[in-house]
Image (cartoon, rainbow, N blue to C red):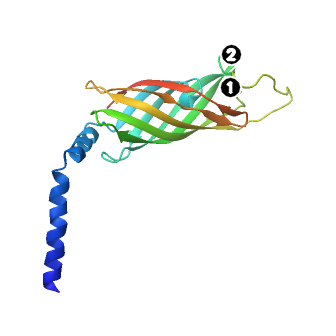
Amino acid sequence: MKKNFYLILLVLSSFDVKSQSDPALNSALNAYSSVKLNTAYVQLFGNGIVLSANYERQLFKKSGLGIHVGFGVCGETGFNWNNSSRLTIPVGINYLLPLKRNNRFVDVGIGATYAKSDMQVYMLVDYRNPNYVNTNFWSCVPSISYRVHTPKHMMYRYGFTPVINQHGFIPFFEFCAGKRF
């Protein structure tokens, strides 16, 4: 029994030594070790519908799992700011998948955006019933993006972020820029 235990322990310890010497694994871990846990950024389109300011927190240094929250503005029908602007509150989760080059990631996430009034995205809805009232409005915003972290702790991200809500599916392309700290 004792011999089997020592044999299993020896085999497991040899796997551990092998994994530490793997260059691909070391490269991925080095990319994650340079990730700052906090990022403040502005976003055009994406989760905030038109324009938003966001805060993101990576939950663990090596997993790439993060959450974000922010606030944004949007005209009642997208870019139509004449009538009134609306506050949006985007929230979501994301996961960073490292690419071979350090500080380059595929950012995959899902988010939800809350607005106090019905927001028609300008390119989808041509006509709305004037008697229609909805005081709680949610949009689902999945995303897949290319993300770059610079040596000066800047973050740039661009990608595909469609908006899905009661009016249908609206394809958006986002751009974000911010500071990691």
In the image, what residue occupies the spot 30% across and 47% down?
A: 62
Residue 22: image location, x then y, percent: 19, 49
In which quadrant will I find the C terminus? top left
In the image, what residue occupies the spot 23% across and 44% down?
A: 24
> Who comes first in sequence, dot 1 or dot 2?
2
Residue 19: image location, x then y, percent: 20, 55
In which quadrant will I find the N terminus? bottom left
Q: Which mark is residue 121?
A: 1
SS of the residue under disc 2? strand
SS of the residue under disc 1? loop
Q: Which mark is residue 80?
A: 2
Left-right relation of 87 to 30: right
Left-right relation of 24 to 45: left
For this rendering, which residue is in front, 171 or 156? 171
In the image, what residue occupies the spot 51% across and 32% down?
A: 70
Q: Nearer the viewer, mark 1 or mark 2?
A: 1
Residue 154: image location, x then y, percent: 33, 25
In the image, what residue occupies the spot 24% across and 47% down?
A: 25
For this rendering, which residue is in front, 89 or 169? 169
> Amino acid under label 1?
Val
- Quarter assignment of residue 10: bottom left
For this rendering, which residue is in front, 83 or 173? 173
> Amino acid under label 2?
Asn
